[in-house]
Image (cartoon, rainbow, N blue to C red):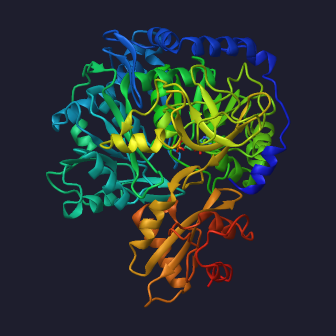
């Protein structure tokens, strides 16, 4: 988070009450109601979650045990049988929602499609049958590498319907990143498209799949299914590659949902951590379904009449939980948009709001900051009066951006929910409930009922109000990740051992620093590990470093975040070259392109600084703190006495 954000957050004192007329019709109507729910959940979390599971979900068979907790491994609703695709589709078909819009999709070139619950159900069943015909069985993993088109959601739901865990790989990742994920998940099938539209250009996807699979790159993949979207010429390998529309033609729209055990794996989603290799975060069926369902319902005060729009990509957890599963489980109308603001149409988001009468709008602070730059005349030229609630996610929001969002987009009438959560948590953890909790710009406010959050030191002791510390969760919750795919030990090490168990209680360590103010409000300050947040995307510095050192010119690389007004953080790389190479601009550009190739455009370093040495401790650890100072254009602050070779600092300052 940029320094200026930290400063402005620290000075923030404004308090915004939920508008009275909003509270009157809200699911949770007052601070007292919130407190009652919170206290009830805290007193007996199992009863709290069990009651909700009974009320909110359909079960083929009820569970025997609400929670089986063998720290750090949790099982929820053990013995129960349910299916999230059934909860998202079938159960709505016997109600008036049958003909309600489930998914409203807007393509970047202006094409659009609306699928009712009945239509979506039919397409999901057909595609589930296609997968079955290709030999996909319960438990087989399916890779999904798609643009933002309805088929992405259809493929996810079809997998869920037959019990084949999906692993969605963000369409902006390169073939190398895709290959790693397909190999780790041992995917049997890949679902993709010829390409997608991004800022008036075709982003090719199928050619990336071809590269990933070339030379037996991902040997478990037997079939590739291709949606025709952008219609450029692509290679189709006979026997392996099939057009979606060919296989779907004439296939039965009847495919009963497989009764799944509560703890059957629903999906794997890869996310960046502190080591070079991304982790496969595993989510399971029932707990994730309940958690995304109830957090969305209460946090966005979701009503049956709402048109709800989350601008994330389905390749990230926000897209999984809050474009697809959470909204559909609630029987809501969810909007999916392929495009992004672009020079030829900077106001496109507001066109979508106006066109569909969007009531709930959920985006990221980095998007808001980019929109501020484009100018307020764009939103002002559209009718945004349908909006009733706004949300943000992905990084701390600076109060200036919050206020702009509140004034210009929300017309000063829409509550803003700043939702703190992670891929690992499945759903919202700390967030305002809009009819109940007064908001402060820059604060995610209070924990969701059932979530016991705290701020502690490394020994697990709670810190005093307004002291910084580590954000932890003290009790398991239904939406929590269950393990790292294929590496339970890594799960334990990463999340449960940094902070010692306190009085026998295991603490989930989120990797974020935070403080709590005198009102108990949480202010998340950003990552405390080697993870950076660029345009709301989470990237491991080690991941980018490994990409850099895989280039023959690079002897050593250290990557840090550099404060950036719009992106939050920029990727800034310090690079030491092998002897035969000289530091030229061409080489810097080549290295940037190399990172794009290895990971994807989201990881492209904004700046590469060549250096003759790295600041290291005597034990050989790179002192990233110093590099962060230098990248921010500041002089090196704090203690440098552990530095092994002080002359390195002078070289770095001079840019070698
Ligand atoms: C950051 C995205 C402050 C945080 C859902 C977290 C936030 C990481 C917020 C997870 C917020 C997310 N305020 N920081 N409202 N929301 N973060 O896994 O550092 O892509 O650990 O999940 O984003 O990123 P992830």
Can residue 249 be seen? no
Q: Nearer the viewer, residue 546 or 416?
A: 546
Q: Nearer the viewer, residue 638 or 123?
A: 638
The answer to whether residue 533 is left or right of residue 273 is right
In the rendered image, which quarter is residue 99 located in?
A: top left
The answer to whether residue 328 is left or right of residue 145 is right
Q: Residue at x 42, y 23 (%)?
A: 287
Check the picture and name the quadrant holding the C terminus: bottom right
In the rendered image, which quarter is residue 253 located in?
A: top left
Q: Residue at x 39, y 12 (%)?
A: 58
Where residue 272 appears, as percent x and y from the top left, is 46, 51
Q: Residue at x 63, y 41 (%)?
A: 457
Q: Residue at x 47, y 41 (%)?
A: 497
Where residue 527 appears, as percent x and y from the top left, is 60, 49
Can residue 544 be seen? yes
Residue 630 in the image: above or below residue 318: below
Residue 624 in the image: above or below residue 445: below
Q: Report the number of discs.
A: 0
The answer to whether residue 159 is left or right of residue 648 is left
Where residue 483 appears, as percent x and y from the top left, is 37, 37
Q: Nearer the viewer, residue 412 or 550?
A: 550
Quadrant for ligand 1 reads: top right
Where residue 485 appears, as percent x and y from the top left, is 33, 41
Residue 497 in the image: above or below residue 330: below
Residue 205 in the image: above or below residue 588: above
């Amino acid at each position: 988070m940029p320094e200026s954000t930290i400063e402005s957050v620290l000075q923030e004192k404004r308090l915004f009450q939920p508008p009275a007329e909003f509270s009157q019709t809200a699911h949770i109507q007052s601070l007292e109601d919130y407190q009652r729910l919170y206290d009830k959940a805290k007193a007996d979390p199992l009863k709290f979650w069990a009651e909700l599971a009974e009320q909110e979900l359909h079960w083929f068979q009820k569970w025997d045990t609400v929670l089986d907790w063998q720290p750090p491994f949790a099982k929820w609703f053990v013995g129960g049988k349910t299916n999230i695709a059934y909860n998202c589709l079938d159960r709505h078909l016997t109600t008036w929602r049958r003909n309600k819009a489930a998914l409203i999709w807007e393509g970047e070139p202006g094409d659009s499609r609306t699928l009712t619950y009945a239509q979506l159900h039919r397409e999901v069943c057909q595609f589930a049958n296609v997968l079955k015909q290709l030999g996909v069985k319960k438990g087989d993993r399916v890779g999904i590498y798609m643009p933002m088109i309805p088929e992405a959601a259809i493929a996810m739901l079809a997998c869920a319907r037959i019990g084949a865990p999906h692993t969605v790989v963000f369409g902006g990742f390169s073939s190398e990143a895709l290959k790693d994920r397909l190999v780790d998940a041992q995917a049997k099938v890949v679902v993709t498209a010829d390409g997608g539209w991004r800022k008036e250009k075709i982003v090719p996807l199928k050619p990336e799949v071809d590269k990933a699979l070339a030379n037996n790159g991902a040997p478990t993949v037997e079939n590739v299914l291709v949606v025709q979207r952008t219609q450029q010429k692509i290679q189709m390998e006979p026997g392996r590659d099939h057009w979606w529309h060919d296989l779907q033609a004439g296939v039965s729209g009847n495919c009963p949902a497989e009764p799944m055990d509560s703890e059957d794996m629903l999906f794997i989603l890869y996310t960046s951590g502190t080591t070079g290799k991304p982790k496969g975060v595993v989510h399971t069926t029932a707990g994730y379904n309940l958690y995304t369902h109830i957090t969305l319902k209460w946090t966005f005060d979701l009503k049956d009449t709402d048109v709800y729009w989350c601008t994330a990509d389905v390749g990230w957890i926000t897209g999984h939980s809050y474009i697809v599963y959470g909204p559909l489980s609630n029987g809501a109308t969810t909007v999916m948009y392929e495009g992004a603001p672009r020079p030829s149409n900077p106001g496109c988001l507001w066109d979508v709001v106006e066109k569909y009468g969007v009531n709930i709008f959920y985006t990221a602070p980095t998007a808001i900051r980019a929109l501020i730059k484009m100018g307020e005349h764009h939103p002002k030229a559209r009718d945004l009066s349908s909006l009733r609630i706004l949300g943000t996610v992905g990084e701390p929001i600076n109060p200036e951006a919050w206020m702009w969002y509140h004034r210009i987009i929300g017309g000063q009438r829409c509550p803003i929910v700043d939702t703190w959560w992670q891929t690992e948590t499945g759903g919202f953890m700390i967030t305002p409930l809009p009819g109940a909790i007064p908001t402060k710009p820059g604060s995610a406010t209070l924990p969701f009922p059932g979530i016991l959050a705290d701020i502690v030191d490394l020994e697990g002791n709670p810190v005093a109000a307004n002291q910084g510390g580590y954000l932890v969760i003290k009790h398991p919750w239904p939406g929590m990740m269950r393990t790292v795919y294929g590496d339970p030990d890594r799960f334990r090490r990463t999340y449960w051992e940094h902070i010692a168990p306190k009085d026998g209680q295991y603490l989930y360590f989120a990797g974020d620093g935070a403080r709590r103010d005198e009102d108990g409000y949480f202010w998340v300050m950003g990552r405390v590990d080697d993870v950076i947040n660029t345009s709301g995307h989470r990237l491991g510095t080690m991941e980018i470093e490994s990409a850099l050192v895989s280039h023959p010119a690079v002897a050593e690389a250290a990557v840090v975040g550099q404060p950036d007004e719009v992106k939050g953080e920029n990727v800034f790389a310090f690079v030491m070259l092998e002897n035969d190479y000289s530091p030229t601009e061409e080489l810097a550009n080549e290295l940037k392109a190399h990172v794009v190739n290895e990971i994807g455009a989201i990881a492209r370093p904004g700046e590469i600084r060549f250096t003759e040495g790295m600041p290291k401790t005597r034990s050989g650890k790179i002192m990233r703190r110093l590099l962060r100072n230098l990248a921010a254009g500041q002089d090196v602050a704090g203690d440098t006495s552990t530095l092994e070779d002080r002359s390195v600092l002078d070289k770095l300052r001079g840019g070698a």
